């Protein structure tokens, strides 16, 4: 489509959007206000919200500003209602999702007969969505007149890595790209690592990629399943937080199609059954790659632990304590053994007691730890784990 056609489409959509503002009557316009009414602090009969409300024209129902300017089709519940317009009970119509005394709503005939009301008319948000699409396509067309390399050059000149600059030039969300660029965790990987490529191509958000990275070393199959979109990151974190975090073999059983509740019982694991995610509909087969051009670069956690035990130099150990544990635990033989013992399980499990997690927070000198709840302490401690793990991986021969 040419520039002229995009501009024409944009003008038409803008006109339609302006018309849509007037195309449907609001709930307040349909019901009307009683002639002797003034606003009072009352509970809205539709959504049960307390606030300033007015009485309907028929003197039967109170409605507040919470519902006044909404359109009837913004009420999600359909069925029998007591109409606040005509006061007829058990009519088919619409009402607020919140259960209310009296089953108040508006019947379909009153909605259809209202001035400027058409329940099948196109809505403003639909037009806005189409308008956004047209404007985005128009902007991309304008940018396409430059090569990707030319568009990336100013970002590279400003100091951005070439792969990150090219990703922005190709249209990947610049906020996600810069969130990744400004973080530290990704620097343990080359730019062509599958998890980095997934963010640069827009397949993963930086937040999801960071979360996957936190359990990637312990649960590589689960991490790959998330990268390949075989399972959601939310599903994965639910599984781990429910009690599977320290049981990599059990996680593999679940990915192979087993019921996590049954696996937990067989393996005599302590889990929160109510927090366990649903059974997968199909077994997940491990794949080596999930993003074109990317490569899997999951290092063996056991080789990292072995490296720490046998090959890490005094200088490298000193670097960990002076940089990542500054103000926390001292560089002693006992504290080194503590790090080795828990390396690879994100330092703490969500099922650990808060007191235990607080001890590790003090060990790592987590700032503002005294004011944090258990969930925040776990998150900050795992973040510190990621920093230390990233350093160790850069030291591997």
Image: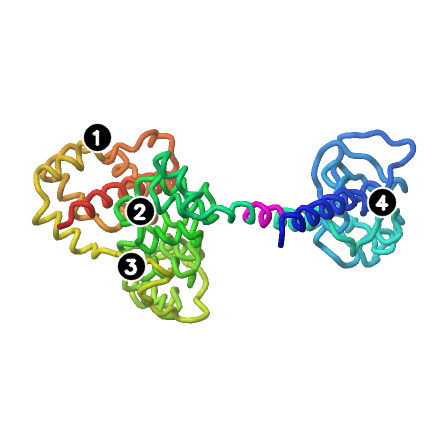
Q: Position of residue 305 (x, y in %)?
A: 16, 51
Say which residue appears at 19% left-offset and 33% top-offset: 329
302 or 241: which is nearer to us? 302
Q: Look at the image and give the residue range highlighted in magenta.
A: 135-140
Answer whether labels 1 and 3 touch (C-beta < 8 Å).
no
Mark 2 or 1 closer to N-term?
A: 1
Q: Confirm or deny contact between disc 2 and disc 4 (CB under 8 A).
A: no
For the residues labelled 4 and 1, the Cα–Cα distance comes to 66 Å
Choose the circle earlier in sequence order: 1 or 3: 3
Mark found first going from the N terminus, 3 or 4: 4
Q: Which residue is mark 2?
A: 352
The residue indicated by pointer 1 is 326
- 89 or 180, which is in the foreground? 180
Q: Would you say residue 137 sits in the magenta stretch?
A: yes
Task: Work out whether residue 302 or residue 182 is closer to the camera in this orientation and state it.
Answer: 182
* Residue sitting at x 27%, y 64%: 249
* Mark 4 or mark 1: whose residue is earlier in sequence: 4
Q: Which residue is mark 4?
A: 30
**In the figure, residue 248 lies in which quadrant?**
bottom left
């Amino acid at each position: 489509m040419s520039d002229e056609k995009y501009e024409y489409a944009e003008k038409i959509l803008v006109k339609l959007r302006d018309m849509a503002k007037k195309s449907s009557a609001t709930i307040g316009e349909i019901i009307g206000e009683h002639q002797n009414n003034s606003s009072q602090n009352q509970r809205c009969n539709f959504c049960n919200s307390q606030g300033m409300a007015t009485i309907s024209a028929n003197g039967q129902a109170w409605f507040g500003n919470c519902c006044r300017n909404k359109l009837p089709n913004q009420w999600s519940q359909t069925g029998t209602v007591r109409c606040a317009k005509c006061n007829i009970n058990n009519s088919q119509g619409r009402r607020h999702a919140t259960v209310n005394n009296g089953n108040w709503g508006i019947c379909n005939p009153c909605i259809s007969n209202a001035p400027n009301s058409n329940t099948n008319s196109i809505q403003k948000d639909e037009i806005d969505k189409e308008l956004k699409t047209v404007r985005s396509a128009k902007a991309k067309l304008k940018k396409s007149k430059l090569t990707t390399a030319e568009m990336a050059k100013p970002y590279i000149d400003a100091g951005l890595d070439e792969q990150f600059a090219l990703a922005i030039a190709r249209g990947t969300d610049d906020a996600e790209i810069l969130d990744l660029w400004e973080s530290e965790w990704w620097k343990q990987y080359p730019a062509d690592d599958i998890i980095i490529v997934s963010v640069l191509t827009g397949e993963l958000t930086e937040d999801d990629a960071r979360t996957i990275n936190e359990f990637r070393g312990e649960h590589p199959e689960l991490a790959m399943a998330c990268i390949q979109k075989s399972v959601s990151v939310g599903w994965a974190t639910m599984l781990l937080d429910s009690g599977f975090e320290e049981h990599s073999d059990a996680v593999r059983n679940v990915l192979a199609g087993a019921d996590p509740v049954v696996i937990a019982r067989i393996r005599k694991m302590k889990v929160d059954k109510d927090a366990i995610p649903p059974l997968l509909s199909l077994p997940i087969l491990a794949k080596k790659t999930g993003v074109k051009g990317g490569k899997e670069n999951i290092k063996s956690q056991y080789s990292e632990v072995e490296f720490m035990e046998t090959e890490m130099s005094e200088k490298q150990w000193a670097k960990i304590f002076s940089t990542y544990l500054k103000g926390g635990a001292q560089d002693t033989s006992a504290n080194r053994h503590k790090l080795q013992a828990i390396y690879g399980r994100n330092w703490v499990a969500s099922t650990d007691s808060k007191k235990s997690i607080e001890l590790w927070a003090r060990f790592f000198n987590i700032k503002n730890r005294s004011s944090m709840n258990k969930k925040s302490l776990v998150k900050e401690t795992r973040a510190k784990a990621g920093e230390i793990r990233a350093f160790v991986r850069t030291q591997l021969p």
